[in-house]
Structures are given as structure tokens and as C-alpha cells.
Amino acid sequence: MYNIIISGVGGQGILSIAFVIDQAALAEGLYFLQSEVHGMSQRGGAVESHLRLSETEIFSPLIPQGEADLILSVEPLEALRYFSFLKPEGTVISSRTPYVNIPDYPPLEEVFREIKKVRESWLIEAGQLAKQAGSLRAENMVVLGAASRYLPLHEDNLKKFIRVLFQSKGEKVVETNLKAFDLGRQAAESQA
Amino acid sequence: MEKVVLLGDEAVALGAIHSGLTAAYSYPGTPASEIMEFLIRQSAGGKNFVAKWCVNEKVAMEEALGVSFAGQRAMVSFKHVGLNVAADPFINAAITGANGGLVIVTADDPGFHSSQNEQDNRFYADFARVLCFEPSSHQEAYDQTREAFDLSEKLGLPVMIRLVTRLAHSRAPVEVREPRGKNQGFKYGYGPDWTLLPANARRRYGDLLQKQKDLQAYAEQCRFNQFFPPEPGQRLGVVATGLAASYFREVANRLETRPAFLKISTYPFPQKKLLELIEQVDEILVMEEGYPFLERFIRGVAGLPGKVIKGKMDGTLPASGELKPEIVARGLGLPVRNGVSLGDFKLPARPPQLCPGCPHADTFKALNEALQGYERGNVFSDIGCYTLGALPPYRAIQSCVCMGASVSMAKGGAEAGVYPSVAVIGDSTFAHSGITPLLDAVYSQTDMTVVILDNSTVAMTGAQPSLGTGEPLDKMLVGLGVSPEHIRVITPLPRNHQLNVGLIQEELAYHGLSVVIARRECIQILGNK
Ligand code: SF4
């Protein structure tokens, strides 16, 4: 069983990340169960998706407390929100780029310091890399790229479904998102 | 068999399509909206079957009833509180009975993710005396929907399906079966069965009572209700319904010896299986999402002599909120793993808020300013994105109860001396349940001001079409009898602020009924264009 929490702020494309992982898992013959948030929280609130991958049948759509292997966050403060789910030996991969829409957003260094208390944690310049790839909205794919070497899935499959996801928006959007994925992956590799 | 990735909501929708659905009706509401979203996408603009958003849940239920009368298969779906709105036709549909298969889907929201309450609609099924399925997985959501249509025609009764948020809004692969075609030919319902004059209704209710034993017999042999005897030496029995059964399965392998386990997916529940479990154990733990519905039955007044019953009523499980795997683990006495602690780092909440540039924000700013200086005023409000206007920085509204209540409460408030008495309601909510109370206010010439936030969509639930927006809305107001001089339209934009404040002030000062329409499109749908 491999348990992932994907987190961020409503509108940051959490469900797109989940879609790509779900489809790749299906293609690789894995079971998966993925819960998501619809409705009110999508209006700029904290949103998360619990995504579980396994070789055997999965029953609970929610990851039990203390059993997440990976937190994959498109926003640094939102990574912290789910620490109670993280295994002590688990991994955190988060964007460094804050989304400030609340008056009491803590100083960023403090947020980073907390994240870095987890031994396996990586902070990615997702905002900058997304811009470099061609669109600020591709931060989610940067983070997915950075996480890809941890996921029990093949990189090719992930990319295949990024293509499927963005196909209807045209080749340029597909290329931007694939590039964002690659830049994220490279950034994580160069830190490792 | 083909595997398709589906939300729980979509598994129900696809199950309905594969059951030969002729028509489906709904009103948007989290966590049920994705059922109709999916149906609309699959309907090919109505070529395959009818899939429509309706003005409200009562209308949706009645339209479905008309389809059933005509011998065709119909489904109606909504969030749990939607069934309150549809309760009148729902209860009576059990008495008319179903001709074509009639399935009612309610998506309950334990945990208040997006709702005013966490009511448990299994009580409604019991109240109406119809059968209710409660799937524990995506596969069952699909399979039970297919079963529900067949059963509805076999029993001649509507059948209910109860989902909860975590099933409705999670995604998994589902194996689908060969679709069945639509019902062929015309076979109308028998008029006297459907005309609930007291003499007919008495007879039909008698029929419904007669059928209760068929429902019970079905529950006893239904393949979705499963009993597993305990491992030797284990004196605990777990009775778990719907998703709770899946949480139990998640943690059960951590127990040293397996308890007796009764998984329940239908109401009425399988009484014989339950007695079989009770006989083999000393302690019974009841786990269910929502209220202690089953637990109350099992406890009765006197409990079970010599047995301990645990669940939500004795505090073994929390009385409110949704179940979670760790709650279920604790209920079984299993340790729960600790995650990573944040120590004394203070994590600020990030509540939802109006989108930057939302038209409601400008309306609230203008309304707040216009109300300054009044001491006995109040703003009653309603259900939609604008309910977030209760939070800072706006703090512009003082109530949110149920669809349409803003208008009726403003009228009641005005009659109790609130002045200015203001109702703030969205265009779709107005169409849903605001028209009738406004007619009441016209009739009484109540001194109140209704602000209709016309953003031309059902924004909160994902931009479904609104049935009361733009020019038709203006005409509707005139038609209802609101005086045309007191139907005012503003465009909520920062640059119009002073103008809007002035205009709202005029209508607040007017001693009579006035309507201010704040008209600007939701920026989310603008973005989608
Ligand atoms: S979705 Fe539309 S109506 Fe809702 S907060 Fe955003 S802009 Fe306003």
C-alpha cells in the first residue's frame, strides 16, 4: 500500500494531479482509491485528496492517521496541514511558492523550517519553474514531476496521462505541462 | 468485463444508464451534483435519455414520478436536505407506488462538509416504508443502482439509494456489465392507484403495508448483506453499514481474532442475520455513518439481556461527524499511529472565501454601507457562495437556514419590527424557493427589501444553469406583482460603489416591498467562456 496526500488551495489543480496518478495506476494494474473535495472548500479554501495505491483491494477512501507515505503539496503551508497523516519516515514534496489569501499567513521561513523537520523533505521552486515552462498554472505538474521518482509508477505512464488530461486544450498546453513535469523532476534530482 | 474509473456519484449515474434510464432529474447540491453532471455529459443532449437540472428537488421528484407513471425508468438525485424539499411527493410516491422503475438517490453529508446539517436520510426511507440501499464501495454503488431499478419494478415501489460524501466524492475503478435497454411500449399506471383520494389512498397504503414483508424477505437474502461468523474464542460482533463496513474491513486484519461481522447494505435490514450474529457474541459494536439508526433498533428500550451494545449512543464512537479509519480502529480498541507533530507551530485555518473579483463582494460592501445608521435592521440570507458573506471582512449577513428562507424570514422579521428587513438571495436559490415567499410579501405589502444576487449561475456547486436569471427574472418579478418602480438593478463593481449605496439606501428608506437586483456574472463562468 502506498498512501499519498495531495494538498493545496482550491483552484491549484489538485484534482489534475490525482487524475494523472489514478490513470497511471490503472494502466499498471494497481488498485487505487482516491477521495477528493468538491463544493464550498474549492473557493480558495484548503483542499486535499487522499490517494491510495495498492496491489490488493483497498477499502477505506481515507488514509488513516499516521499512515501517509507521501505528502505532495502545491503550497507550503498546506503541506503542514496534513502532517498528522504522515508516517514519521514519510516524504514531503512541496512547492516553496506560497499562496497568501489569509491575513495570518505565518512567516515563510517558519513554514519551511517546519517542513524541513521531516528528514525526507524537498522544497521545489514550483512557481518559478512553472513560469519557465510557460504557465504559472502548471505549478501542480512541477510538483508532480518532483514527486515522480518516489511514486510506485512509471514516469512514461505519468506523462502519457498528462497528455490525455490536457489534450483538449491544445498541443501548447500539453507541452507546457510536460515541460513543467520535467523541470520538477530535474529540480528534485539535483537536490537529492 | 470493462473497468471504468468513476466517482461514487458517477457509479450510480452509470448504473442508472445501464439500467435503461429514460429520464433523470436533479437540483445541484454537494455532494450529489456530480451524478447529474455525469448524466448530462452522457446523454448526448437528450438523445440517449433525458437528464435535466430542475428548479428544485420537489419538482425533480414529481417529474420523475410522471416518468414512472408512464412505465419508464426514472431517477432523481439530490443532496440530503434536498429530500426535505421533495418530502411531500416522496412520501406519497410510496403510496402511489412505482410503475416504471423509480430510484431516489440521496447523498448525505456526515461531517457537514458542505451543508447546514448532517441529517440521516435512512429515516426517510423508513418513514415512507420503502427499501433503501446503502453501498459500501464504488462497485456496490453501480451494482446496487442496477438492482434498485429492477427491484423497484418488481415491488412496484420507489427504491432509495443512500450515499455519503466520502463515497460520492471518491474515485475508483468499477467493473461494468452489459447495459439493459429502456422499457418498451406504453404501460401507464392504473389511475385509481395514482389518485390519492382518501378511499384510494387507504387502499394503497394497505398495499404498501402488505409489501413490507416482501421488503423484509428481500433483505434477508440480498447478496449485499453478508454475515461472517466469528473466529473461535472471539465474543465480539461488529454490525457495520455502508461505508462503515469498508472502514471496518480496512482495520479488521489488525485484530488477532476475527469478530463476527454483519455487513448491512439494505433497509429494512436483515433481521435473521442480525439475530444469528447476536446469538454468537457477548458484545455488539454498531458502526454506521450518520445517526445511530440501526443502533436504536438493536438497543430498543431494554437492550439485549446479557449483551453489551456499543456504538454512537454510549460514546464508543462520536455521536456527530463522519467516521474515519482511525475512529473505527479506536472503537475496536486498536492503537492509532501517530503522524508527524507540528509541536507548537500554530497552523492558521484557510476557510473558503469569495473569489477575488466576485460580484457578491461589491454588493456586500455597498449593502453594509447603505445599512449604516439603522439600529433595528437585519440581513437575512440564503444558500450559495454569498453565504460566505457572513465571514470577515464582510460580516454582511445574519442568517442562512434553508433554500429560500431569506425571503420568508425577512417578511416574518419585518412583521416583528425589524427595519430595514433585508433578504439576500441568489438568482437560482430565488427560483428554487424564493418565488413563493415573495408572492406572500407582495400580498401583504410587507415593508422589506429583497436583494437578488443575479450572477446567472449556480456558482457554489460548479456553475450549473440557473432557471431565474436575467430578463426572465425581471419579468417574473413584475408578474409576481412587485411594483416596477421598486425593482431596481445595480451592477456590482467597485467603480459603481457610491451609486449602488445610494440606490440601495433609497429602497431601504421606501416603506413597502422593493427588490434590488445586483446583476453581474460570476467570474468563474466568465473564465470558462
Ligand atoms: S464562484 Fe462566482 S459567485 Fe462564487 S465566489 Fe467565485 S465569483 Fe463569486
Image (spheres, coloured by chain):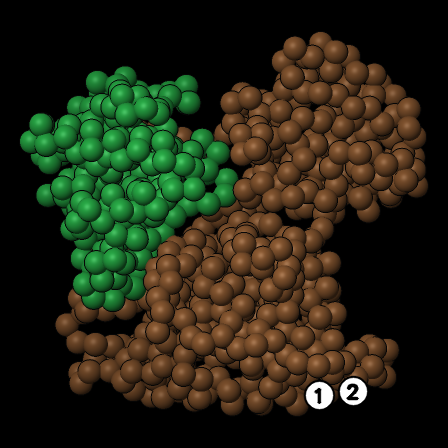
Position in image of residue B445 (x %, y %): 92, 35
* Residue at the spot 30% in from the left edge and 53% down from the top edge: A23
Chain of the residue displaying label 1: B
State the image coordinates of residue B444 (x, y, percent, origin top left).
92, 39
Q: Amino acid at mark 2?
A: Arg
What residue would you read off at disc 2? B203
Position of the N terminus of chain B by quadrant: bottom left
Residue B416 screen position, x and y as percent? 82, 35
* In the image, farthest residue toward the front: A171
Query: Which residue is rendered at x = 21% and y = 58% of the image?
Result: A28
Tell me whether the residue at label 2 lies in contact with that at label 1, contact meaning CB atoms closer than 8 angstroms: yes
> How far apart, in angstroms, are the residues tagged by discs 2 and 1?
6 Å
Chain corresponding to brown in the figure: B
Q: Mark 2 packing: few (<14 Cα in 10 Å), some, or many (20+)?
A: some
| Image location (x, y in percent) of residue B358 | 58, 25
The correct choice, above or below, for A60 with respect to B151 in the image is: above
Q: In the rendered image, is residue B410 in sight?
A: no
Q: Quadrant of residue A123?
A: top left
Under tag 1, what secondary structure? Answer: helix
Query: What is chain A's hue in the picture?
Result: green
Tell me the residue at 37%/33% (across/down): A173
Residue named by callout 1: B207
Pointer 2 indicates a residue of which chain? B
The answer to which of A169 and B120 lies nearer the viewer is: A169
